[in-house]
């Protein structure tokens, strides 16, 4: 084990985060905080740096304040900008995560220029992943083919212009790829996620999968869970794979794609990820892409004086998550 990533949900909800960071550093691990930035003030930031934080990643929803707050459902953009400036006062690696989708891709060039002013070491341009709440709002989020094509060109130009100064990582959205991504580097291949209750998962969303029981770190050592638990063995390697994955030349690269996406789109966690162009049920992704052409167009940011008002004004476009469980 080399890295300890503190992610969520929102890791800043943990009041003992400095202690967790200190323990990770004492164990010789590289520490990374992945956060929305909400709840991180100068005092807490100093405490985290003092505990040995090596890297921090802050997410942004847009370059325009009104649009960013509209997408997030919270007046958070101005705070994130100030937080980014505070982060640059420390010797810590800094990544900006820009979440892109149908509602903001038309001004991607502007957003990249904005991020440059924050002086990050790295930019991650991440298309919304259609799980959970994003799946419920997919029609409003899925980009058009024209947006994807133009976005690829803009990113390539930015990579060339910023080479040697800012690293840019970006991939096209799953639904537009020929082959699926190796979700989390493959099930049980690279990552273990320990949730607040102590359950150990191979990915953030794995608990949506039925009939899989995940071990708890309070009951079993991490090494045993990694090497012997049924949950980590379930989709590890190639023996579980159906056709066409089992004999596909790409099986060692994408591992059949995402198990959670397979479940959500086909009802079968063991199916080939429908994002793959070779998948027997790829038609469900093709249908979603066709529907995107008839889906909600890009809207102007519609603010509200309260969260309830914001929900009401945007009900025809998307639904905000109000009570995460």
Image (cartoon, rainbow, N blue to C red):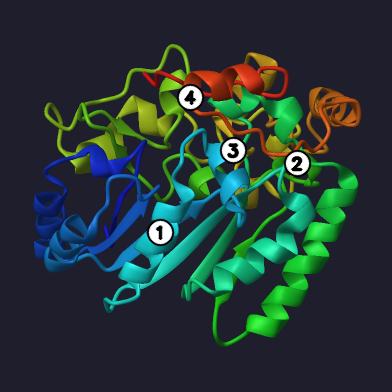
The vertical placement of 44 against 165, above or below, is: above
Tell me where residue 303 appears, x and y as whole percent.
Answer: 60, 33
Q: Is residue 240 visible?
A: no
Tell me where residue 98 appears, x and y as whole percent.
Answer: 57, 55
Q: Which tag, 1 or 2, sits closer to the chain's start?
A: 1
Q: Is residue 265 visible?
A: yes
For the point 75% across and 41% down, the residue is 102
Q: Are marks 4 and 2 in contact (CB under 8 Å)?
A: no
Q: Which tag, 4 or 2, sits closer to the chain's start?
A: 2
Per the model, the C-alpha gap separating discs 3 and 4 is: 12 Å
Q: Which tag, 1 or 4, sits closer to the chain's start?
A: 1
Question: Label 1's element?
Answer: strand
Question: Label 4's element?
Answer: helix
Numbered badge on residue 57: 1
| Viewer-side label of 2, 3 | 3
Question: Label 2's element?
Answer: loop
301 left or right, relative to 278: left
For the point 64% across and 13% down, the residue is 267
* The image quarter in which residue 135 lies: top right
Numbered badge on residue 71: 3
Question: Label 3's element?
Answer: helix
For the point 65% across and 21% down, the residue is 313
Q: Which tag, 2 or 3, sits closer to the chain's start?
A: 3
**Closer to the camera in the image, 124 or 294:** 294
Q: Quadrant of the C terminus?
A: top left
Residue behind mark 4: 307
Q: Dot 2, how many residues are within 10 Å of its Cα: few (below 14), some (14-19), or many (20+)?
A: many
């Amino acid at each position: 084990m080399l890295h300890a990533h503190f992610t969520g949900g929102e890791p800043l909800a943990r009041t003992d985060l400095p202690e967790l960071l200190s323990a990770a550093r004492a164990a010789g691990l590289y520490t990374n905080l992945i956060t929305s930035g909400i709840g991180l003030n100068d005092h807490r930031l100093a405490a985290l740096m003092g505990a040995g934080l090596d890297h921090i990643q802050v997410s942004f929803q847009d370059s325009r304040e009104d649009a960013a707050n509209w997408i997030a459902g919270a007046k958070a953009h101005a705070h994130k900008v100030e937080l980014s400036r505070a982060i640059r006062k420390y010797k810590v690696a800094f990544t900006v995560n820009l979440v892109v989708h149908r509602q903001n891709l038309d001004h991607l060039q502007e957003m990249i220029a904005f991020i440059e002013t924050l002086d990050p070491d790295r930019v991650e341009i991440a298309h919304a992943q259609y799980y959970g709440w994003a799946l419920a709002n997919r029609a409003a989020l899925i980009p058009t083919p024209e947006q994807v094509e133009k976005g690829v060109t803009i990113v390539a130009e930015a990579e060339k212009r910023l080479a040697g100064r800012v690293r840019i990582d970006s991939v096209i959205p799953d639904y537009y790829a020929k082959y699926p991504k190796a979700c989390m580097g493959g099930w049980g291949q690279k990552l273990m996620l320990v949730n607040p209750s102590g359950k150990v998962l191979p990915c953030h969303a794995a608990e949506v999968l039925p009939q899989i029981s995940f071990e708890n770190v309070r009951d079993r050592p991490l090494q045993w869970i990694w090497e012997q638990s049924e949950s980590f063995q379930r989709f590890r390697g190639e023996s579980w794979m159906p056709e066409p994955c089992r004999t596909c030349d790409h099986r060692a690269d994408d591992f059949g794609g995402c198990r959670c996406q397979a479940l959500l789109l086909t009802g079968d966690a063991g199916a080939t990820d429908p994002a793959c162009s070779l998948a027997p049920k790829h038609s469900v992704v093709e249908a979603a892409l066709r529907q995107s052409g008839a889906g909600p167009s890009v809207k102007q940011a519609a603010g509200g004086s309260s969260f309830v008002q914001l929900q009401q004004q945007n009900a025809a476009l998307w639904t905000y998550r109000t009570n995460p469980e």
